[in-house]
Amino acid sequence: MKVSETKATPPGQSPGVAPESDVAVRDIAAPDRVTTAEASQLKDSTSNGINMAAAERALRIESLTQQVRSGTYHPSVSRLAEEILAQADLDARLARGFQ
């Protein structure tokens, strides 16, 4: 690549650095600020989600326990087979990956 135009760099300025007059006003006016408000809100939201998931899981387990005890629990045999095969496939892939 051939450069056809050249500009002289004024004394006291490094090449490739924009002069201070070219810097945007917003970069000068807005100091950096760090707040923890968003982190606190995220922590609270995550905690609430975990608690809700735990409560839903506990209800599901209680429901399944009652179904098993009453003899009304009838799992899907095909879904159970799919899950067993998927787990066996994953185990085989992991075993190959660690060799």
Image: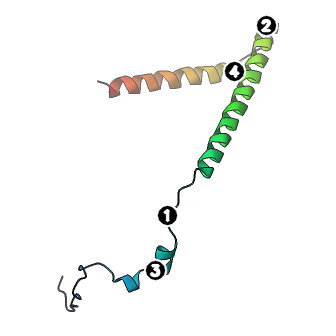
Mark 1 belongs to which amino acid? Asp
Q: Nearer the viewer, mark 3 or mark 4?
A: 3
Cα distance, mark 4 to mark 2?
18 Å
- Crowding at dot 1, Cα within 10 Å, few <14 / some 14-19 / many 20+, comes out as few
Cα distance, mark 2 to mark 1?
61 Å
Label 2 with label 1: CB-CB less than 8 Å = no
Where residue 58 sits in the image (x, y, percent)? 73, 22
Mark 4 belongs to which amino acid? Ser
64 versus 34 height, above or below: above
Quickly name the residue at label 4: 76
65 versus 23 height, above or below: above
Quickly name the residue at label 3: 24
Quickly name the residue at label 2: 69
Where residue 55 sits in the image (x, y, percent)? 74, 27
Label 3 with label 2: CB-CB less than 8 Å = no
Where residue 69 sits in the image (x, y, percent)? 79, 7
Cα distance, mark 3 to mark 2?
71 Å
Q: Secondary structure at mark 4?
A: loop
**Which quadrant holds the C terminus?**
top left
Mark closer to the chain start, 3 or 4: 3
Mark closer to the chain start, 3 or 1: 3
In front of the other: 70 or 10: 10
Mark closer to the chain start, 2 or 1: 1
